[in-house]
Amino acid sequence: MKRLPDAEFAVMQGVWHSDVPVSTADIKSCLDRKKEWNMSALQTVLSRLEEKGFVKSEKAGRNRFYTPLVTEEEYLVTEGESFAERIGTKSVPGLVAAMFGGRKISRAEAEELMEFINKNRKE
């Protein structure tokens, strides 16, 4: 799976966080909450995502609706593995340290991390 440029990742987040199938207008509304998008640019990015196999589209009347073909979790796992390879670590502590950059984590973050570790620990 190819790494998505920032703009394509932002659009995929709009698709992932919407009820599917989702219209172009609804994706734009979702994205506009963070940064205003030009409809033409959005349509171009959606076309690229379809060519790359991240979404499929269907036309219904004058509207086009999109459904993700890759889940957010699948993409983030692949992206995490790629990141670990780029920084040269396969160790969980090394990866966590790189992600947090030495900053202190909150109690809630620590509890969430411990929950993840306990759930995914090999016996």
Image (cartoon, helix red, strand yellow):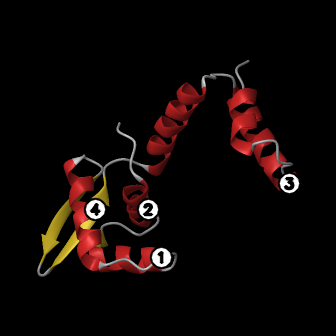
Mark 3 falls on what kind of element? loop
Cα distance in 3D space between marks 4 and 1? 15 Å
Q: Residue under circle 3?
A: 106
Going 35% across and 66% down the picture, which residue do you hit?
A: 20
Q: Nearer the viewer, residue 60 or 5?
A: 5
Amino acid carrying mark 2 in the image? Ala
Residue 11 found in image quarter: bottom left
| Residues at marks 3 and 4, CA–CA distance in whole angstroms | 36 Å
Does the residue at mark 2 contact the one at mark 4 (Cβ under 8 Å)? no
Residue 80 spot, x, y in % from top left: 55, 37
Residue position for label 2: 10
Amino acid residing under circle 4: Val
Residue at which label 1 appears: 35
Disc 2, SS: helix
Q: Is residue 93 above or below residue 62?
A: above
Tell which of 114 and 6 is nearer to you.
6
- Give the residue type at disc 3: Ser
Mark 1: secondary structure: loop
Q: CA distance from mark 2 to mark 3?
A: 26 Å
- Contact (CB < 8 A) between labels 3 and 1? no
Q: Residue at x 28, y 62 (%)?
A: 45
Question: x%, y% of residue 112?
Answer: 77, 48
Which disc is residue 45 wearing?
4
Whole-angstrom CA distance, mark 2 to mark 1, is 10 Å
Residue in view at x 50 percent, y 46 percent:
73
Tell me whether circle 2 and circle 1 mark residues in contact (CB < 8 Å): yes
Counting residues from the start of the chain, the first of labels 4 and 1 encountered is 1
